[in-house]
Image: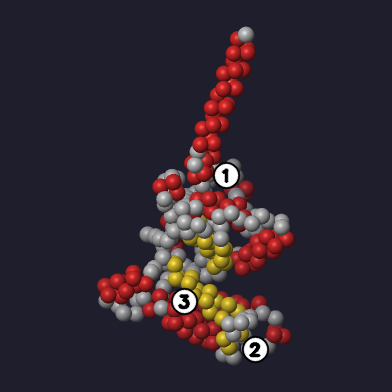
Amino acid sequence: MAEDERKEEVGTTIVEATDKEDEMKPWEQHSAVISIPRFDYKASSSLLRHSHSAFLITCPIKREKSATKEAIAILEKYIVSNPDAKRRKICMEDANEECNGSEGAANEHVNSESDTSIKKSDILSLVKLTRSGLLLFTFPFGKSPAVVDIVSQIFQSLESGILKSPLWCNRILPIQGTCPLEEKELKKIVTQLVDQFIINRPKETGNTVKFAVGYNRRGIEETEMKNLRKTSSDPDVFALLDRNKCFSVVAAAVKEVVPDSTVDLKDPELSVLVEVLARSG
């Protein structure tokens, strides 16, 4: 009898726990059982000093945590880990941001059992942006994996059915380099990337390069731009926020490397996409 009573109590407890779990919101379940990466504020400041490779991912607003977990699960399948990488301590942020309507997810590097068994996702840092619905994962300075090839592999896996379509990640963009919002710095990074493109380009393709330029501004609206221009003492400080100005700077950088290059929006051999992002902090 005593044994039967204990079984009944255990059974009741399990049923009650299951009912409570069913009542939990999705973000509460994530917070309870999933280790969510945390924001890396050192990586955010490093963007102003160095060029970084990265991935920019768009997702539904207030679903940043779900998209972060999903993105990490996808990216770690295709990123080659570096066993010699050292562990880095990351600034921590409250894990309950999404249930409060927060935009961000967080980036936390969990201690591993040994330095030679580092998770592939641990080399990525999550940078906090001011706009909701955006995730920016950066690689450490000096590490420049082939992010374009990684994204291409992801798309091939999606097309073949090897990888299931993500629920929360809408778009993933490879970022080959970052720079401050300055004309000199933008021209420098574009020149470097075009140089690398020419080096890797088959010689039999000739000297002419057909290129196109894309531009997106995220996190700074038109009304905010007008206010910034009014309060700024330097009229050129926000020049690159103008689409046409940005186009001209990029085109000049491309032509500096390849004088015979021409614009071709329908069938470009080289595409340069500029993403203007407002980081937090």
Q: Nearer the viewer, residue 189 or 130?
A: 130
Q: Which badge, 1 or 3, is on the more N-terminal residue?
A: 1
The quarter of the rendered structure image containing the C terminus is bottom left
* Residue drawn at x 60%, y 77% as measured from the top left: 196
The quarter of the rendered structure image containing the N terminus is top right
- Which residue in the structure is indicated by mark 1? 112
Q: Position of residue 11 (x, y in %)?
A: 60, 22
Q: How is the image coloured?
A: secondary structure
Q: Which mark is on residue 207?
A: 2
User: Nearer the observer, disc 1 or disc 3?
Assistant: 3
Q: Marks 1 and 2, Cα distance to the nearest angstrom?
A: 49 Å
The amino acid marked with disc number 1 is Ser
Q: Position of residue 236 (x, y in %)?
A: 34, 80
* Residue 279 in view, yes or no: yes
- Which residue in the structure is indicated by mark 3? 186
Q: Is residue 243 left or right of residue 224?
A: right
* Residue 120 in view, yes or no: no
Q: Secondary structure at mark 3?
A: helix
Q: Which badge, 3 or 2, is on the more N-terminal residue?
A: 3
Q: Which badge, 1 or 2, is on the more N-terminal residue?
A: 1
Please identify the quarter of the rendering in which residue 53 is found. Answer: bottom right
